[in-house]
């Protein structure tokens, strides 16, 4: 897949923390942080900061308010990176739950990403995920996964 989907962006430590806290909020929205969600957040945080031991304390913090997240992510690139990451996280446990959707929509609104743009980002995330399956010979399996990406 193209590097355009998740471009290299410089992220400060406070921005990485904000993104991780936002991702934890999305993960908790459907009842708790699943193992795959925790692994994805950990991988993101460890690749963007030297404060790996700080991740557990971020998980215990209260939900990061959408306006606060938007203030910590001032550029459109950072905001889109967060929303794409949140959408990927929502799909990582196999189900994009309604409560996850509501949390992502609240963050998107605060980040000045309108519903049309969010819909486009959701489609891009699905394309990205399906693109990683396109080499598989089990067409029926790929079709089943594609249907599973519907909300």
Image (cartoon, grey):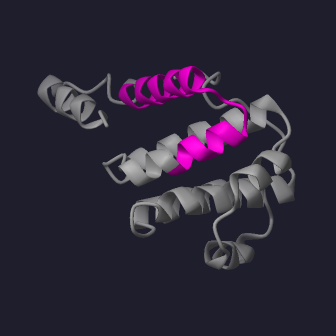
**Residue at 19% in and 24% down:** 137
**Residue at 72% in and 70% down:** 52
Q: Nearer the viewer, residue 136 or 8?
A: 8
Quarter of the figure with residue 6:
top right
Classify 56 as above or below 15.
Answer: below
Classify 53 as above or below 3.
Answer: below
Left or right of 145? Residue 4 is right
Count of numbered circles on the image: 0
**Residue at 76% in and 38% down:** 78
**Residue at 49% in and 60% down:** 27
Quarter of the figure with residue 45:
bottom right
Classify 140 as above or below 64.
Answer: above
Residue 113 screen position, x and y as percent: 66, 30
Residue 111 magenta-highlighted: yes
Left or right of 23? Residue 39 is left
Residue 115 screen position, x and y as percent: 55, 26
Left or right of 95? Residue 10 is right
Image quadrant occupied by the C terminus: top left
The prevailing secondary structure element of the residues shown in magenta is: helix
Residue 146 magenta-highlighted: no
Classify 31 as above or below 87.
Answer: below
Residue 14 screen position, x and y as percent: 85, 59
Q: Nearer the viewer, residue 94 or 1?
A: 94
Q: Nearer the viewer, residue 13 or 66?
A: 66
Residue 54 screen position, x and y as percent: 74, 75
Furthest-left residue in this view: 140
What's the magenta region?
103-130
């Amino acid at each position: 897949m193209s590097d355009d989907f998740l471009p290299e962006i410089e992220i400060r430590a406070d921005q990485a923390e904000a993104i991780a806290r936002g991702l934890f909020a999305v993960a908790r929205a459907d009842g708790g942080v699943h193992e795959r969600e925790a692994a994805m957040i950990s991988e993101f945080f460890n690749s963007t900061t030297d404060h790996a031991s700080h991740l557990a304390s971020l998980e215990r913090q209260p939900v990061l308010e959408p306006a606060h997240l938007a203030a910590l992510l001032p550029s459109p690139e950072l905001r889109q990176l967060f929303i794409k990451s949140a959408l990927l996280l929502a799909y990582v446990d196999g189900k994009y739950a309604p409560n996850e959707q509501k949390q992502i929509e609240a963050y998107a609104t605060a980040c000045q990403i309108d519903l049309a743009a969010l819909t486009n980002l959701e489609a891009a995330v699905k394309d990205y995920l399906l693109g990683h399956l396109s080499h598989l010979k089990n067409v029926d399996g790929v079709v089943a996964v594609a249907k599973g990406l519907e909300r």
